């Protein structure tokens, strides 16, 4: 099995050997390409080594591999070696490529190009023969076209030839653009490996890839009476363009360790490529607003309130959800929302996995501000998508929603057009207060009180009262402290009282007491006025006092006369007629009146 | 009275211009009632004449101080003025005096002062006549009355001064230019807008020297404003 390494030496190396000492450095460089085996089985890897050697290999580029038909490049490594040959420095740079055959047959690896300085050096082509492997050829993942993925337990016979094998399967081979496919990679093994095998996923040009699931633990399955451990990796694929697409092989590299047939060599398994036919979306019945969404979706709306004050925002959520690639979903068709001010929506996208299906949810959050009161309708939002299950286009439509808009604070403002801020309004209210009704008679209130004379005249009243009070007080003080003053002030009143009584007596014809009263009235009056005891007043004394005060003699005489009459009548009652008595009374009255002024 | 009711009905019918005319007719008859001016202010405001509305409210306020409706509407309407006057910072005493000043009309204050004067005189009379027995009571009453009387008279003095010497006007045109002298050829200093209250200092023919509450003054054409 171990093959002798065969080296192809290119012309360059001969030239290098012959031309030792040549000045042209590029000519010293030799490039060789070699493979470790010229004959490999299809499930084994081979190593292509490109060696560049020469005095100075610095400044050389990496080798450029030609297009390799029938091989896949699995890995690259490089190493360099410096040695002395005849006192000269010789450098060797090696590049190793691990190649995996794709199929059985004879292949030629075309010359490898290496640029050294300005020169391009080419290697010789290398022949490789790929034969049917001694190991298991990986079973083909291809099942009947359009057929459903069959469970691994029901593998057809003949597959489980080896102890370890892999498969890739898709759930369908025909799909519409954007329709989800499930790619399942399955790994079967009945060996216990030294290291965990390395999985290289297939390349899927033309598909959008989403991871679905990866088995954490192996399951046991029985195939043809043999027990295998099985692990699966599932991937969702969404074709992005129509046409034929190829899913390239997936690889699994494992090491058998100190196996029987190799010295711990790495082994690679490979699946078959899978061809998928991607159908374009039908042109028939394509809605004008279709934006490329494929999947089974539903559309719903949710407003946070059905009744709102004018000017306050409503949050409207339009939710698109369903199975499909939500990343390719465009925007909604927003209806003409009359009466609302609509702000740009906030968009939230999320996806989840339900079984083998990718589900997506896209939430469009709109803020709507009603601009007028009353009943407003949020018209339906629409969205068009293609349902690959039904093979038809669908236009989703939300329900129309009724919003009751009540007049808000801002409402009255803009209606009145005053344009005040909310803060200012809080200070005073929304509008001016209403007019005053007619209550009571209208009056001219513009008169100025302090300018009217009447007002000032009125102000005099308390002043006069005050002055009066002042004099009243002085009078009282005099009364209290001066007996003579008091007697004099009271004299007239006293006299008048007595004369009144005398007149009464006259009517009663009580002449005796009558004269006494008159006499008493006079003497008391004069006594009061002169401040002397009335009882001691004699005619002479009166005359004396009167003379001192320059009172006419006539007055004194009259007093004497009255006294005389009174005395006479007292001692001879009835000497005077009623007429005389009345005259006497009148005389006394007049006299007192005159005396009041004189004393 | 019938004019008043008719004006009220036109106002309610939202025929504000007619309501204005009717209320103005009442004032022209010589009936200067605060209610009429208040309603007139409302009508002017609804008719979109801000300056005239403020003028009417100011007139109503002089006749009916302490009327909440007038204060509320004046406060509201003032917010719509173009010229915004920042509220002045004032200490407690000044505020108290100003509140007292605003809370009473000239006649009200006159009556209050007169009433206080009469009460004081009666107390004095009481003291004179019955001083011996009720001396301390009379003195206490006099002190209290005097404590009220003095500030009332002080404020009254300001009121009388304002009534007799201070003339205020409201700008009724949209915009009035104030110039450095009485005449259009003088430099423009500032502009006042509808609804702003100014103090009239002097008149010179068609022109008047006005001063704003901020203290700056200028000559404006008399047509653009109306005295309160």
Image (cartoon, rainbow, N blue to C red):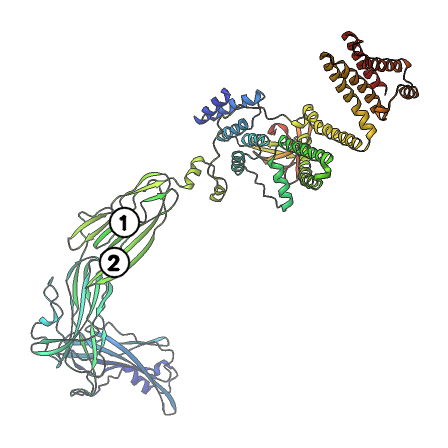
Q: Chain of mark 2?
A: A
Position of residue A411 relative to residue A517, above or below, is: below
Q: A192 left or right of A480?
A: left
Which numbered disc, 1 or 2, marks the residue closer to the eye? 1
- In three-dimensional space, the C-alpha distance between marks 1 and 2, rounded to whole angstroms, equals 16 Å
The answer to which of B39 and A391 lies nearer the viewer is B39
Q: Could you say which disc has been placed on residue A301 in the image?
A: 1
Q: A484 left or right of A435?
A: right
Q: Chain of mark 1?
A: A
Q: Position of residue B49 (x, y in %)?
A: 52, 30
Q: Please tell me how crowded label 2 is: few (under 14), some (14-19), or many (20+) other residues with Cα within 10 Å.
A: many
Query: Of the residues under marks 1 and 2, which one precedes in the sequence?
Result: 1
Quadrant that contains the C terminus of chain B: top right
The answer to which of B128 and A307 lies nearer the viewer is B128
Q: Position of residue A194 (x, y in %)?
A: 21, 84
**Quarter occupied by residue A144:** bottom left
Residue receiving disc 2: A360
The answer to which of A573 and B205 lies nearer the viewer is A573
Q: A158 left or right of A536?
A: left
**Quarter occupied by residue A156:** bottom left
Q: Residue at x 38, y 39 (%)?
A: A407
The answer to which of B160 and A459 lies nearer the viewer is A459
> Disc 2 on helix, strand or loop?
strand
Q: Residue at x 70, y 28 (%)?
A: A459
Q: Position of residue B167 (x, y in %)?
A: 65, 31
Q: Could you say which disc has been placed on residue A105 in the image?
A: none
**Quarter occupied by residue A45:** bottom left
> Can residue B218 be seen from the camera position used here?
yes
Q: A464 left or right of A312?
A: right
> Disc 1 on helix, strand or loop?
strand
> Can residue B180 be seen from the camera position used here?
no
């Amino acid at each position: 099995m171990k093959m002798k390494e065969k080296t192809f030496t290119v012309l360059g190396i001969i030239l290098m050997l012959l031309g030792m000492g040549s000045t042209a450095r590029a000519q010293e460089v030799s490039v060789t390409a070699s493979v470790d085996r010229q004959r490999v089985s299809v499930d084994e890897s081979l190593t292509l080594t490109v060696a560049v050697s020469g005095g100075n290999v610095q400044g050389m580029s990496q080798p450029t591999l030609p297009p390799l038909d029938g091989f896949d490049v699995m890995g690259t490594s490089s190493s360099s070696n410096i040695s002395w040959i005849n006192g000269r420095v010789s450098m060797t740079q090696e590049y190793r490529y691990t190649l995996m055959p794709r199929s059985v047959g004879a292949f030629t690896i075309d010359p490898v190009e290496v640029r050294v300085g300005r020169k391009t050096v080419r290697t010789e082509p290398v022949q490789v023969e790929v034969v049917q492997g001694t190991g298991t050829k990986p079973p083909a993942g291809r099942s009947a076209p359009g057929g459903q993925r069959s469970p691994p337990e029901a593998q057809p016979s003949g597959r489980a030839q080896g102890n370890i094998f892999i498969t890739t399967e898709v759930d369908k081979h025909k799909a519409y653009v954007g329709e989800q496919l499930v790619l399942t990679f399955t790994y079967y093994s009945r060996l216990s490996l030294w290291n965990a095998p390395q999985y290289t996923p297939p390349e899927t040009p033309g598909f959008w890839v989403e991871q679905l699931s990866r088995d954490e633990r192996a399951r046991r399955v029985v195939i043809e009476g043999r027990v295998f451990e099985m692990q699966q990796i599932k991937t969702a694929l969404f074709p992005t363009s129509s046409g034929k697409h190829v899913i390239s092989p997936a690889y699994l590299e494992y090491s058998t360790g100190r196996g029987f047939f190799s010295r711990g060599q790495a082994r690679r398994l490979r699946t078959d490529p899978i061809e998928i036919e991607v159908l374009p979306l039908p042109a028939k019945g394509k809605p004008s607003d279709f934006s490329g969404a494929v999947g089974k979706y539903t559309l719903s709306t949710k407003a946070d309130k059905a009744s709102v004050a004018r000017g306050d925002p409503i949050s409207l959520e339009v939710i698109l959800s369903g199975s499909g690639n939500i990343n390719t979903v465009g925007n909604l068709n927003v209806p003409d929302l009359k009466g609302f001010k609509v702000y740009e929506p906030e968009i939230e996208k999320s996806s989840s996995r339900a079984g083998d299906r990718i589900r997506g949810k896209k939430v469009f959050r709109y803020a709507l501000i009603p601009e007028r009161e009353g009943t407003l309708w949020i018209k339906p939002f629409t969205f068009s998508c293609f349902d690959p299950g039904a093979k038809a286009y669908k236009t989703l439509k939300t329900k129309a929603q009724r919003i009751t808009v009540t007049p808000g604070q801002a409402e009255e403002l803009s209606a009145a057009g005053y344009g005040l801020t909310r803060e200012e309004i809080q200070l005073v209210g929304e509008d001016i207060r209403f007019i005053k009704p007619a209550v009571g008679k209208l009056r001219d209130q513009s008169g100025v009180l302090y300018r009217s004379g009447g007002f000032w005249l009125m102000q005099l009243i308390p002043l006069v009262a005050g002055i009066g009070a002042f004099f009243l007080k002085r009078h009282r003080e005099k009364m209290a402290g001066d007996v003579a003053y008091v007697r004099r002030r009271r004299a007239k009143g006293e006299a008048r009282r007595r004369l009144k009584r005398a007149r009464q007596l006259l009517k009663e014809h009580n002449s005796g007491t009558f004269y006494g009263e008159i006499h008493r009235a006079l003497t008391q009056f004069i006594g009061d006025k002169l401040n002397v005891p009335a009882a001691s007043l004699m005619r002479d004394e009166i005359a004396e006092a009167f003379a001192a005060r320059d009172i006419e003699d006539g007055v004194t005489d009259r007093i004497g006369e009255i006294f005389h009459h009174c005395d006479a009548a007292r001692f001879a009652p009835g000497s005077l007629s009623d007429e005389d008595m009345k005259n006497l009374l009148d005389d006394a009255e007049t006299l007192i009146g005159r005396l009041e002024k004189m004393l | 009275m019938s004019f008043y009711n008719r004006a009220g009905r036109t106002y309610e019918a939202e025929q504000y211009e007619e309501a204005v005319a009717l209320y103005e007719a009442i004032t022209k008859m010589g009936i200067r009632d605060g209610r009429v001016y208040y309603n007139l202010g409302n009508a002017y405001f609804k008719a979109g004449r801000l300056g005239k509305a403020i003028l009417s409210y100011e007139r109503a306020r002089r006749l009916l101080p302490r009327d909440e409706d007038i204060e509320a509407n004046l406060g509201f309407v003032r917010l719509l003025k173009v010229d915004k006057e920042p509220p002045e910072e004032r200490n407690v005493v000044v505020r108290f005096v100003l509140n007292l000043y605003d809370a009473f009309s000239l006649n009200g204050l006159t009556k209050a002062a007169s009433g206080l004067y009469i009460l004081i005189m009666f107390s004095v009379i009481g003291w004179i006549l019955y001083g011996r027995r009720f001396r301390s009571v009379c003195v206490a009453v006099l002190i209290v009355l005097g404590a009220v009387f003095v500030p009332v008279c002080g404020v009254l003095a300001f009121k009388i001064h304002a009534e007799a010497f201070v003339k205020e006007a409201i700008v009724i045109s949209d915009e009035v230019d104030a110039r450095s002298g009485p005449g259009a050829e003088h430099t423009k200093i500032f502009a006042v807008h509808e609804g702003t209250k100014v103090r009239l200092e002097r008149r010179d023919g068609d022109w008047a020297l006005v001063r704003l509450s901020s203290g700056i003054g200028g000559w404006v054409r008399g047509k653009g404003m109306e005295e309160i």
